[in-house]
Structure formats: structure tokens, C-alpha cells
Amino acid sequence: DSGVTQTPKHLITATGQRVTLRCSPRSGDLSVYWYQQSLDQGLQFLIQYYNGEERAKGNILERFSAQQFPDLHSELNLSSLELGDSALYFCASSVQAGRTDTQYFGPGTRLTVL
Amino acid sequence: DAKTTQPPSMDCAEGRAANLPCNHSTISGNEYVYWYRQIHSQGPQYIIHGLKNNETNEMASLIITEDRKSSTLILPHATLRDTAVYYCIVRPQGYSTLTFGKGTMLLVSP
């Protein structure tokens, strides 16, 4: 158990819908990262927040957005969902935001878009 | 970004040492080598990381060559639960994110 929690574990929805994935980082961690893992793309970094502020952006679509709240939990919002958005979404957290900080991953949310 | 090259798959007998190689010939002097593993659709699990010196923790050992162009992750006594995809990652200077490649699928058999 990494200490990172994600809800829900599974999500099934239809194309065009909007969903919200939630992540609670490890106690004391200020930085949160979101990753997407699909069969054809592998594990890809989406976005990072540090203490409430966006720190880095990866291959995140404009239909996706995220935020980190004052209590440091984070939410990833996915809208106008397409079949290709079906994937595992992982959240990770680290103490700070530096390149030597170890990231610890949550168990993931499996999103299925029908 | 420094690229990594790993064999797509490896086999190991239970109880034996598993030695997973990684080539990172374009690594820069201040880039760290990280190893993670992912057990079937679970969240990636941190294993170990290093810069220049060999490192050991309760899970594994990391051997980095003197020129830093390659490294080897060693699981000293592999168990069936070590069956997973192992990712070798070089962390670019100035970036805190992780770039995952395809990794090595390690199959530990009885």
C-alpha cells in the first residue's frame, strides 16, 4: 500500500459524458501527478500540481482538466468522453516537486467509455 | 531526454537472482536512474534509484556502470510475486515527471 488513494476504482460511462477522478496523496506530500495508461500508448504523464499550483503539463487533452485543492487532494476531470479515453488513470504523489523526489502511485481508476 | 533500452521480456526461475539490464547511453551527468515495476494493472511500484554508486534496499540492488551508460536491477531471490513489468527510467534534468517506456516483462516460474 503506497498511501495514495484513488476513487472510484472502476468507472463505466458513455461517450460524450463527463467524469471526475479523485486522488488523495500520501500524508505530507505536496505534489500530485496524473498519468494515463492505455493499451496502445503505455503509461503517459498528463499533469502535475504542486501545493495547489500547476507545475508541469504533459500529453493532456484540452477536454481534460485537473486541480489540486487546499487539502492537497486532486481531481482529474474528463469531459466529452470518447471511446479512446478508456484507460487506467493513475495518480502519484511526492513530497516536493524536485527531480529526485520519489513518486508513489495509487491503485488507479479504470475508466471504460462505451 | 535520455532514452532507455530494455529487453521486452525475461524469464527467471523462482529462488534465483533476476538480473534486468537497461541501456541508457545518452544519460547526462546529473540524471538519475529510477526503477519501477507494475504488477498486472496495479499502480507502478517504486523499487530503487541511483546516480553513480551502486544502491541496495530491501527490494533490490542497482548496479550502475562506471560510465553510467547502463545499469542492472538485481532481484536477489525472485519469487512468483515478482512477476511484473519492470521499467527503467532516466529522469531528465529539470523535470520531476517520469517517462515510462515499454519496460521488461519478467516472468518468474516455479
Image (cartoon, rainbow, N blue to C red):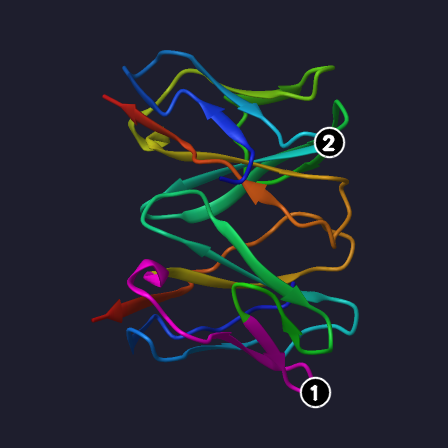
Q: From the image, tell me which residue sits under label 1.
A: B67
Vertical comparison of A19 with B12: above or below = above
The local crowd at label 1, few if under 14, some if 14 to 19, many if 20 or more residues have their Cα within 10 Å, is: few
Q: Is residue B33 visible?
A: no
In which quadrant of the rendered view does residue B29 lie?
A: bottom right
- Asked if residue B11 is among those painted magenta in the image, a careful observer would answer no
Q: Quadrant of the C terminus of chain B?
A: bottom left
Q: Quadrant of the N terminus of chain B?
A: bottom right
Are both tags, 2 and 1, on one chain?
A: no
Q: From the image, tell me which residue sits under label 2.
A: A28
Residue at image location 60% in from the left, 80% down from the top: B63
Subunit of label 2:
A
Vertical comparison of B104 with B41: above or below = below
Q: Is residue B105 left or right of residue B31?
A: left
Q: Position of residue A52 (x, y in %)?
A: 75, 22
Q: Residue lying furthest bottom in this view?
A: B66
Helix, strand or loop at mark 2: loop
Q: Position of residue B76 (x, y in %)?
A: 45, 76
Residue at image location 64% in from the left, 64% down from the top: B49
The local crowd at label 2, few if under 14, some if 14 to 19, many if 20 or more residues have their Cα within 10 Å, is: few
Q: Is residue B108 left or right of residue A95?
A: left
Query: What is the three-letter code of the residue carrying label 2?
Result: Gly
Foreground mark, 2 or 1, reads 2
Q: Position of residue B25 (x, y in %)?
A: 61, 80
The tag on residue A37 is none
Q: Is residue B52 left or right of residue A105?
A: right
Q: CA distance from mark 2 to mark 1?
A: 36 Å
Subunit of label 1:
B
| Region rendered in magenta | B61-83
Which residue is at the front of the view, A9 or B14?
A: B14
- Asked if residue B79 is among those painted magenta in the image, a careful observer would answer yes
Query: What is the three-letter code of the residue carrying label 1?
Result: Asp
